Amino acid sequence: MEGEKHPINKKLAVATFCILALIIGGVFYYVYYMPRSVTSINVAFDWFIYGKFAMFYPAQQFGWYKDVGLDVTFLPGAGSADNVKRLLNGEVQFAFVDGIQIVVAKTLGVNLTAVGAYHDKNPVVVYAWNWTGVKEPKDLDGKTIITAMGGDENAMLPIFLKKQNVTDYTINTVDFPTQLNGFISNATGYGIIATYVTVLPNIEASGVHPNIIWLADYGLDVYSNVITCRTDYLKAHSDIVAKFVNVTYRSVKWSLQHQAQAFNIFMTWNPSIANDTATRSVETGQFNVGIELINTTIAQQHTYGYMTLIKWEDTSNMVYYSNMISAPLTVDQVQSLYTNQYLP
Amino acid sequence: MDIKKGVSPIIVFVLFILVWQLVPIHPLVLPKPYTVFLRVVTDISNGILVGETIVTLQEILLGFAISSVLAVLIGILVGEFDFLKNAIYPYLIAIQATPVMTIAPIIILIFGYGIMSKVVIGGLISFFPILTNVVNGLNSVDKELLELIKSFRASRFKVLTKVKLPCALPYIFTGLETSSVICVVGVIFGEFLGSSSGLGNYIVAKQFNLDSSAIFSAVVILTLIGMLMFFSIRLIHKKVTFWEGK
């Protein structure tokens, strides 16, 4: 019997080897090759894609969204109110919505939750040609101001002027391009517009260097662009919200630390934006304005995107004083408008 | 036969309302028809929509009236004088080919934020359909009829007033009917671009407030204005050109 091969043991050894090889190969394949389940989400900006949104693109470039199982598509928008509707009909999961619309939606029984501020400083400003002599709020007395239809400034400006004891004024509303072109070409003859600071690079590129009054610098600093989702979506998919918000603000932080690189990444991802010197200059200007709006004292004290109850209460009160809602929101209601929980 | 004729649009309307009611879209995006109906009644009874409607109606009627008169006059001149047709018709087509939407912001800046810019935009957009119909109408006259009246040594003016214009009337009214609806669109677009009152301004303001039922109540009023304009002109059309279809 000695020296005789044991046929059963040999077969067992081969079978064991094959099973082990299959298991190891399967695990290896799963870890390295098996496609992970990816969640597709759409994010709506509040306007066409321009330099202000550059801070989102490093996350795309470095695959940070993909790393957490998200396939993110950024879409241009047509304003904050339109984005509320896009959230409601499910076209997008996240959108740029102004604080004003979140408050109004709440009173209409639509629950939206702000998951991070993008404009921590309110971007509404009054631009005035030098010849108007307007340098500070009191100079607006007796003047006509051109505002853009559907813009936050329509709600904010009367309250701002009242706070500044300016009572004799006229507001003319036009659509946004007409407002901007009219101001730049001085065709309106009034030389004063109230709109967003994000268009300053466009104005300056045309050779006009207006005086600027920030409403936020005179005590009217309410939430403008915040990244928003539906509250029911947040409850049902808190893991997705957590991943998206965390990666997005990581991208914001990286962009602030590597501004030139972040801007180049943005331009690479948006080839439709002309890459000539003039356009790059305007887009860079818009990127820098975006940084100014997000990199505030509050953000530095806490984290980028951090929101405060006081400022949300101010936002709610402003909406009430502008007669857009019949009663101010309660503290509980205001608290339900936002969460800092998912910020990194 | 007449009963069938009257019932069919009602059936379509009821079906439309039913589909609208059943479409599962959030009411902030598409409010239900009953909500819109109630809102129309409320906004009219408390006077909110009345003031805005009067402003828009003024702009529409003025724009339509000016454009109609100019289009008929220019159409007659172009239709009657070949040299004028050769000289200005290509440019009239060029004006029509230029999208009014793109030049509307300039019109706002030139004519201001008041009623006049909306009148110009509404008038401009409704001008061409009338003009082409006038020219086509004048050119559609039976040549034998023209020869006949000319054989009586009728003057050019007589030919125009006694033969050409009556023959062109059905065409002219078709142009007026089309333009009456287009004019509403033009005026509202003008109000979207720059205004401080009117239904277009009201819609933009309510869009900002997320007040969808108010937006739709204004849309209902605009639809009614458009329909009223169209059917009024059609009624006049039928009364004036009573020989048509006989």
Image: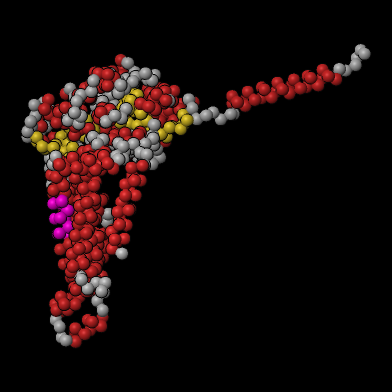
On the question of residue A280 being in view, the answer is: no
Where, quadrant-wise, is the N terminus of chain A in this rendering?
Answer: top right
Q: Considering depth in this image, is B233 or A254 the residue closer to the camera?
A: B233
Does residue A22 show up magenta in the picture? no
| Count of numbered tags | 0
Location of residue A23 (image quadrant): top right
Location of residue A237 (image quadrant): top left
Residue at 23% over, 55% down = B227
Q: Which region of the structure is painted magenta?
A: B57-67
Residue A106: percent from the left, percent from the top? 28, 27
Residue at 15% over, 42% down = B45
Residue at 66% over, 25% down = A25
Q: Considering depth in this image, is A181 or B16 the residue closer to the camera?
A: B16
State how the image is colored. Answer: secondary structure
On the question of residue A208 being in view, the answer is: yes
Residue A182 relative to residue B97: left or right: left
Residue A91: percent from the left, percent from the top? 39, 36
Residue B14: percent from the left, percent from the top? 31, 49
Where, quadrant-wise, is the C terminus of chain A in this rendering?
Answer: top left
Does residue B64 show up magenta in the picture? yes
| Magenta segment main secondary structure | helix
Residue A113 relative to residue B205: left or right: right
The image shows residue A129, relative to residue B117, as above or below, that is: above
Residue B54 relative to residue A38: left or right: left
Residue B63: percent from the left, percent from the top? 16, 55
Q: Which residue lies furthest to the right in this view?
A: A1
Q: Residue furthest top?
A: A2
Residue at 21% over, 22% down = A314
Location of residue A154 (image quadrant): top left
